[in-house]
Amino acid sequence: MLGEGTFLSLLSFLQAHGPDPVTRQVTRPAAQDEARHVAFGMAHLQWRLGRDPKLRGRLAAAIKRRHAALAQTTGLHEEVFDALVLLAAGAWRPDAIAAGFARVQALKAEMAAGRRRRLTRLGFTEEAAAALSELHTRNFM
């Protein structure tokens, strides 16, 4: 659910900053579909946790194992980051590039906040949710 929710944020970002009407229009139904996946997954996990509270520990362990397995990744590829900045900038002017950079930073913060919010909905403490959110891969997925 962490990766799916992060992808949902990315789709919303593309919907807001897509370079043309078609891109913006196509991301809308994709985001709606992804939102259904996230809602279903969260509801299912909440249901499971209601019946097996020990699952929370296994979920945390799975997040830590995934992080360890992907620790050698370098995070968001520089070219992808630059492309998102340019997409959000909408122009080549220095002030537009700066605004695009700020929008991508805001996207990253929104993604982290969404992961923390989902984890706290699943019963993790604020501290545990923040720590587990930080273990999420920086490639947005």
Image (tube, helix red, strand yellow):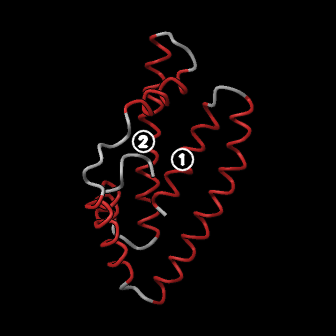
In the figure, is residue 129 to the left or right of 11? Answer: left
Q: Secondary structure under badge 2?
A: helix
Position of residue 74 measured from the top left corner of the image (x, y, whole percent): 29, 43
- Bin the neighbour count of mark 2 within 10 Å (Cα to Cα): few under 14, some 14-19, many 20 and up: some
- Would you say 107 lies left or right of 43 here? left
Label annotation for residue 36: none
- In the displayed structure, 75 sits above or below 93; it is below
User: Which residue matches tag 2?
Assistant: 108
Nearest the viewer among 130 and 66 is 66
Residue at 49 percent across and 28 percent down: it is 83
Which residue occupies 62% across, 57% down? 34
Residue 139 drawn at (x, y percent) = 40, 46
Residue that sits furthest to the bottom in the current view:
51
- Give the mark nearer the N terminus: 2 vs 1: 1
Q: Residue at x 52, y 56 (%)?
A: 5
Q: Secondary structure at mark 1?
A: helix
The answer to whether mark 2 and mark 1 are in CB contact below 8 A is no
Q: Which amino acid type is marked by label 1? A: Ser
Front position in the image: 59 or 49:
59
Residue 33 or residue 128, whichever sits in front: 33
What is the x, y in percent for residue 108?
Answer: 42, 42
Three-letter amino acid code of the residue under disc 2: Lys
Crowdedness near tag 1: few (<14), some (14–19) or many (≥20) residues, C-alpha within 10 Å = many
**Residue extending furthest toward the top:** 93
**Label for residue 9?**
1
Please tell me whether residue 107 is drawn above or below residue 103 in the rendered image: below
Q: CA distance from mark 2 to mark 1?
A: 9 Å
